[in-house]
Every structure is written in structure tokens, then in C-alpha cells.
Image (cartoon, grey):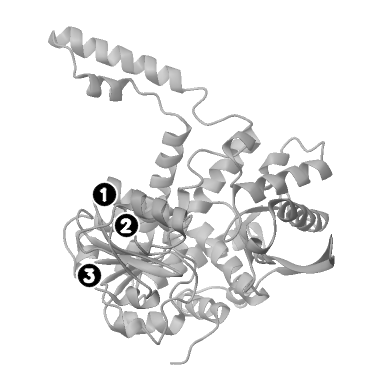
Amino acid sequence: MGELSFLDGVNRYYDEAVATLDLPPGLGEKIKQCNSVFMVRFPIGFRDGYRIFTGWRVVHSEHRLPVKGGIRYSPEVNQEEVEALAALMSYKCAVVDVPFGGAKGALKINPSEYTDGEMERITRRFARELVNKGYISPSLNVPAPDIGTGEREMAWMADEYLRMAPTDINAMACVTGKPVHEGGIAGRGEATGRGVQLGLREFFRHEKDVASAGLNGSLANKRVIIQGLGKVGYPAAKCLHEEDECRIVALIEHNGSLLNPAGIHIETARNWYREHGTFEGCPEGTYTSATRAVLEEECDILIPAAREGEITAENAGRIQAPLIAEAANGPITFAGHAILRAAGKVVIPDIYLNAGGVVVSYFEWIKNLSHIRFGRLGRRIEEARGDYIVDAIEKTSGQALPPDLAGKIRWGSNELDLVRSGLDDAMRIAYQQIREVLLSRKDIPDLRAAAYRVAIEKIARTNMEMGV
């Protein structure tokens, strides 16, 4: 099977899943197509002259408003890639029951070639272009960070929107992924990576599912290879290592990899990489200049958390991991997935496992609209109730509770606790819906097809109930 483009691959997954549904004629095609594509070219003046920048904002589906999706800064990005990512956002939001449509944005730029001041000018100008056309708005179109962007860029965009709409009381809800002190929410930075951890936890709660991958037991001591130690891979690695006692046996970056069968201490490895720009010399393991080849090393769980198209028809047959967890968007090509499926590998798909970021973005959007941080009204009531419980137990038993247990009972939930709880709930329920479809239908071959069917069915229902 020849390789398909990223967009064609997403559409083929869609076609396979929609064929299992009995939709009204034309509705399936309507859901698949992108609603609108906005491309903009704008000049920025520098000391040596003007430079022209090209950007996009693609809206895939407006069955729910606002539409949601990150903005990517990359020198390699193109319109078709943005269209594919926007489609994934529609399906992702539907899978985890976040009431947004799907969108995506991008700017063709290499941020490393510009100073911080220049990046601010460029970002603010791009934001103005999007706001002028209605592609940034708390009620219509809400961007978020992606590759090449982060809290800094979101703060600039939010401020630019506020300058252009100073009377909009909900202006800070125009983007998510902002710094906490600028209207952001605790836990957003770790959200996608923690969602990977929570998705894997839910998978391992189902003995039959674990057995289907040729594994057994819990996550504890499972050998994990992670590609990409960025805003998704790092929190996923940290959470799995520190909270679930996974053994991270390899870390892959674009300029080399670190291997240690006994397990890598994530914080040490990350701090080394940030300081030196390479894993070479890191005491946590053995360095190799190999990158994609390390995906083929023996492990229990392979987590591609970098970019799309890393596992292809060329290398899929050499993947040894029985379980592949798609932490990135589209890390496995359509042809690569077919090979993995034929080999009996289990793939937890991106439209489910990568959805933690949009779940917590939804929480941030709600926080901005309600103008109050989560937990502010109820935390002290919870603490007081905990005091009563501890007091009652100690008076009844005549013994003092251990301080650590008493502290847990007295604890009142803060914003981070509530965000993590909500994310956990979303990931659990979504996986249970996906596996129910997989187990109940013979025409659904794997978790990816099941996830697409769940998403399409929800979007179709909204379209039919609300009117196309």
C-alpha cells in the first residue's frame, strides 16, 4: 500500500468508520469536508526590509460553537496539514464530549530565526488579521497553543483581541493556554501529556483489552519508549514514571536518543537536554545519534509524542511494541496503521489519547466566561467538613488519626485538583464508549475505527437535531 497524505489518511479513516453508520444521504460527506479555509499573507517591516508571512485558520466543523484548535508555528507547515489537523480536532472534541467544533491554525515561520520582540510583532499582526475576519472570538473561534507556540503567544493574542474589542467582557476567553495569571488555568500545560497517562490507565483497567495487546497486569514496570520530550511527551513521561512506576527505557529527540533498559529518571534527562541541547553525555543512559530507528526497539508501550508521519509503511513492520499510544497528532500514517493492524498490534488512537489538551482548554474557556477560578467558592467548606469528620472519628475512637491521613481528609480541592479530576473523568468515559463500540460490532476492527465511529455519530446527531 502506498503512502497517503496526512489529510487523505484522516479522510480514509473517516470513510471506513462512516460506512458502518446509516446516515442520511449527503450528511456523511458534509461532516467530512472543511467548512472554510482562511489564508492570509501580511508584511512585517524589519531593518533590512519587509518580509511576507503566510498563515492559515481552517474551520472544519461548526456543528458546535465556538470552534477550537491550536495555532502552529513551523517552517514546514502547509494548508493541507492544517486541514487534516482541523478535522482531527472536530473528531477529538466529539470523542471526549467537549462542545466545540474543530479548527486549526498555522503560521509558516521558524521562531528560532527571530528575536522575542520580533516574534511579538509578528504574532500580534497575525492575531489582528484573524480577529478582523472573525477567526479569533470567544464565541466563534478559540485558538490554543500547538507546536512552536505556547503561553507567551496566547497572551499576546488575547491582549491583541482585547485591544480590538475593549468592551467585550469575555475577551480573555478568545484563546486558551494562557499563563495562569493572565486568565489561564492550572494544569493546562500538562494536560495533553497527563491525558495520555490517564488514557493508558483506563486501558489497563480492562483486562481483556490489555490481553489483546499481549500484555498483563498494571502499568507498573511496563517498559516505555517515548518519542519527543516536549509539551506532550515530557508530562506524559513524568506522570507515567513518577505516578505509575513505568520504566522509561528510551527517550527520542530529533537529534539523538537516550537508552537505558533499567529506566531513565525523567527530570534528570530533561534538565540535561535543556541545558546541553542533546542527550549526549547524559548520565541517565546510553546516547545514540539514531532517532526513528529507536522506535523499533523492544518495549511494552511505544508513545510517539512528536509529529505526524513518524511510523510509516517503511518502518511499521519493524515496530516491536505490542501497544502504541498515539500522543501526537497523526504519528502513524494510514499505510503504517494497516501494517500494525495486520500484525496484531494495538493502537490507542490520537483522536482519543491526544484530547487532554482540548478538555482542559474547555475548562479554561468556562473559567474565563464565569470570571471565577475553580474551587474558590467551595474549598473552605470542604476543609471544614473534613475537620468535622476527623474530629468525629477521633472522638468516637479515642485515638488520633495519623497526620497524613487526617490531612487528606481535611483537604479542600483547589483548581488543579478539580481540573485533573475533570480530565480523568473525560478520559475514562470516552474510552469506555470507544471500547463498547469495538466489543459490540463485528464491522469495527480496532480502537481507531471505534473512536471515529463514536465521533461521527455524535456530530451527525447534533447536525440532525439542530439542523444542518
Of callouts 3 and 1, the N-terminal one: 3
> Residue 220 vs residue 193: left or right?
left
Instruction: Name the amino acid, label 3.
Output: Ser
Answer yes or no: do the residues labelled 1 and 2 have beta carbons within 8 Å? Answer: yes
Q: Which mark is residue 244?
A: 1
| Residue 363 shows up from this direction | yes
Answer yes or no: do the residues labelled 2 and 3 have beta carbons within 8 Å? Answer: no
Q: Is residue 282 above or below residue 336?
A: above
Instruction: Name the amino acid, label 1.
Output: Asp
Of callouts 1 and 2, the N-terminal one: 2
Callout count: 3
- State the image quarter where residue 381 is shown: top left
Residue 303: give x, y in percent of width and height.
Answer: 36, 65
Q: Which mark is residue 200?
A: 2
Q: Which residue is mark 3?
A: 212
Give me the residue at 42% from left, 41% from top: 420
Q: Secondary structure at mark 2?
A: helix
Q: Which mark is residue 330?
A: none
Dot 1 surroundings within 10 Å: few (below 14), some, or many (20 or more)?
A: some
Q: Nearer the viewer, mark 2 or mark 3?
A: 2
Q: Secondary structure at mark 3?
A: helix
Q: Nearer the viewer, mark 3 or mark 1?
A: 1
Give me the residue at 84% from left, 61% from top: 47
